[in-house]
Amino acid sequence: MHGLRVFFQSFDGILFVAMLLLTFFGLVTMYSYQGENIYFNKQLWWIGIAVMTFVLALLPDYRFFRVGNTTFFVYLATIIALILVLVIGEVTLGAQSRFNFGFFSLQPSDPAKLVLIIVLAKYFSKRHEMIGDFRHIIISGLYTFGVFALVFIQPDFGSAIILFFIWFGMILVAGIKFRHLMIVFLLGAITFGGMWQFGFHDYQKQRIATFLNPLQDIQGAGYNAYQSTVAVGSGELLGKGIGYGTQSKLLFLPEYETDFIFAAFAEEWGLLGVLLLFFCFGVVIWRLLYHAAHGASNFETLFACGVAILLVSHFFVHIGMNIGLLPVTGTTVPFLSYGGSHLITEFLAIAMVLAMRRYSRKNMTLELETDSMFLA
């Protein structure tokens, strides 16, 4: 009985339906009327596991992340996992970024994003009144850099960029001063210059060059970006129909189930489908920001904002690279792209936000009033 009450106190039906619709859009985009549907069948299992994770993650009380050393130990475990994947991880498409356990693979960079949100939410919530001190920006940046550097050298440039956006977005939410923001931009420019000289691989430099001039090498580095824009444009108003995307199903568009699933979706669903996709995603962000505004403390508010920043960053970076506005970086789109690591992380993150609403100021007051009525 208590477990059911806890569940319904945390559950947000509007948010959950929007999440399921997005996973449905991704699932049917993987479906083909010709040949095998390996990704479709596997994704069904991942969605089931993600929903189970969501339900179970609604039950705990996450206030232990606010105090004590739990958050630091979780961060330390994440760093160790990212180091281990560089030593014994499986190499896929040139990146050593996942553990292969035989029947499934785990990509630690996905839960690492959630861990970073927890760390930054705790750090900034403890120092909210002192956020004007620039050293807190530096210290939070060092926490971020520890994860960023290990992900970057895998190399997983897309996830590294998302980690940067999480940090940058959360320092904005925490209340950074304008002059400090300018310093951050200057440091970012210097860092980018250094990475260009000493950090970027040749293929990453080529991707950025292709971004500046997408048509310079259509048969080589610009092939994926070109085919992606063709797929998006060919969908027109109503799309070609589910399972009938020629660019994706005939493999002109590589990795259509992951890196280019928005292009594959737009080809089959058209402009109206894309508008529906944006609407559902907007509902998810709206509900997250609503729960952020009703957080029990700065920690819950910052955490919910961090999750929203994570999803928005993935969404717009993915779409940007699919329509030729950003370099191809290999990022997934939340809830749509194939894969279990990112999907489970997203469902877990949102469940944690919803679980935190149980002890928000509003819900705690209602619970006390309910208990008083029963006692009377």
Image: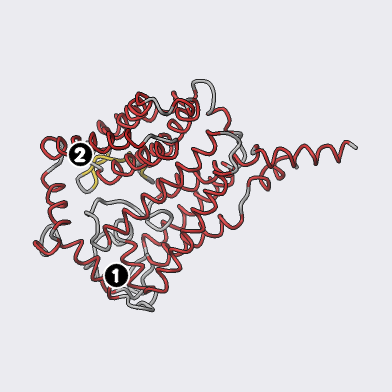
Left or right relative to 89: residue 203: left
Q: Which residue is drawn at the image coordinates 16% and 52% (left, top)?
A: 207
Position above or below: 247 against 135? below
Position above or below: 106 against 41? above
Position in image of residue 326 (x %, y %): 24, 55
Left or right relative to 17: residue 238: left
Q: CA distance from mark 1 to mark 2?
A: 32 Å
Residue occupying the far top of the picture? 68
Q: Are marks 1 and 2 in contact (CB under 8 Å)?
A: no
In the image shown, does 160 or 177 lie closer to the viewer?
177
Position in image of residue 78 (x %, y %): 38, 30
- Tell me the SS state at disc 1: helix
Position in image of residue 320 (x %, y %): 29, 58
Q: Which residue is drawn at the image coordinates 36% and 78% (left, top)?
A: 237
Q: What amino acid type is highlighted by mark number 1?
A: Val
Position in image of residue 282 (x %, y %): 47, 58
Left or right relative to 186: residue 69: right
Q: What amino acid type is highlighted by mark number 2?
A: Ala
Q: Quadrant of residue 323?
A: bottom left
Left or right relative to 32: residue 213: left
Residue 189, labelled with which disc? 2
Residue 109, labelled with which disc? none
Q: Which residue is drawn at the image coordinates 31% and 73% (left, top)?
A: 245
Disc 1: which residue: 232
Q: Where is the C terminus found, in terms of image quarters?
A: top right
